[in-house]
Amino acid sequence: MKRVFGAAFTMAATVAVGLSWATIGNAACGKVSISEMNWASASLMANVDKIILEKGYGCEVELVAGDTMPTFTSMNEKGAPDVAPELWANAVAVPLKKAVGEKRLIVANEGPISGLGEGWWLSPYTAKKHNLKTAADVIARPDLFPYAEDKSKGAFVGCPAGWGCQLVNQNLFRAFEMEKKGWVLVDPGSAAGLDGSMNKALTRNESWFGYYWSPTSLIGKHSLTKVDFGVPFVGKDHWDNCIVKPEKECANPKKSAWTTSVVNTVVTSNFKKNASVALDYISGRVYPGSVMNKMLVFMDTEKAQGKDAAYEFLEKYSNVWTKWVSPDVAKKIKASL
């Protein structure tokens, strides 16, 4: 009987100690709110962060619907949500710099996804077959990308009307003198039209040349080749005061590489103070661009939401995410899957 009660007491004590340590672990992280922005890669990242912070660090995580401007404004003015996993910082560059300087926000990770950005892309087999590496190489061969309405000209597929990149493509089209060299700048009409033009050509093994961005499911699905502009970035002054402006405000656009896309993981100062145990993870996680594109293909093909995609990523790419955490944390996360 003594042994029974002794064992029971020992077990109770062990459980109590375990619970106390669990409480300490939770207290070290506490409640965390993460913005789940309304595009696939951001949703995936938010859900991966939720699982890792909950299962690995004992945080209590809430996902909050968001988008670039509303999320940034809320974080800056209200201190919530705590984390924006994928903030495209070019859109908020000036107020973000101010918020960081005034210690309201912290850029916890300057590059959570590698190999991303906007630019010009072409079908990979065309690039390989004809050794097309730079914009000059491509522009010299309009015959490889025949325009549907006039086969004697090449088709460069730009951005739909109303998109900021429409003006950039129009000005770079002029800067590289593409019309004179036998090209037509094609307006795809809509996002669906842009995607459709690429899908139609590439599923038929036809050549395609145009604007797009990464990470995206279509870049991953078709393994498109990004074009090297062959010239350096023209500089912020000319880009901001000419390249992004309507033609009447940019009489003489200069050749330029596309401006660098800046994507950060941004956290509030409260997150650093209250959940510092998890900040090392947030600061060190980087998704290889090729892996992110594959995950976006999975999400598109399987119609998977962020939560399902997060579990797929954690199960399939342990060689990636286990480098972001300690062995003990990785063990806890694997046990939870």
Image (spheres, rainbow, N blue to C red):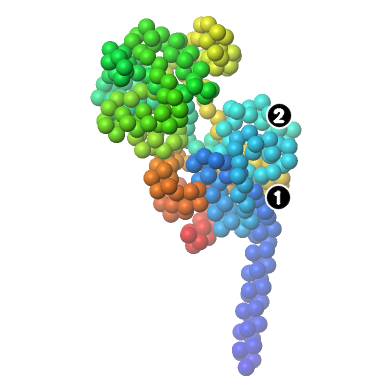
Q: Look at label 1 and name its amino acid.
A: Asn
Q: Which numbered marker is on residue 274?
A: 1
Q: For the residue labelled by badge 1, is the local secondary structure a helix, a strand or a loop? A: helix
The reply, left or right, for residue 90 in relation to residue 275 is left
Q: For residue 102, what is the image quadrant?
A: top right
Task: Report crowding for label 1: few under 14, some 14 to 19, many 20 or more residues within 10 A (C-alpha).
Answer: some
Up-down relation of residue 104 to residue 134 (above or below): below
Up-down relation of residue 256 to residue 291 (above or below): above
Q: Position of residue 74 (x, y in %)?
A: 69, 39
Q: Look at label 2 and name its amino acid.
A: Lys
Q: Which numbered marker is on residue 98?
A: 2
Q: Of residues 187 and 168, which is closer to you in this image?
A: 187
- Residue at the image position 44 percent from the left and 24 percent from the top: 189
The reply, left or right, for residue 231 in relation to residue 20 is left
The reply, left or right, for residue 183 in relation to residue 52 is left
Up-down relation of residue 51 to residue 219 (above or below): below
- Residue at the image position 68 percent from the left and 55 percent from the top: 30
Give the mark nearest the N terminus, 2 or 1: 2
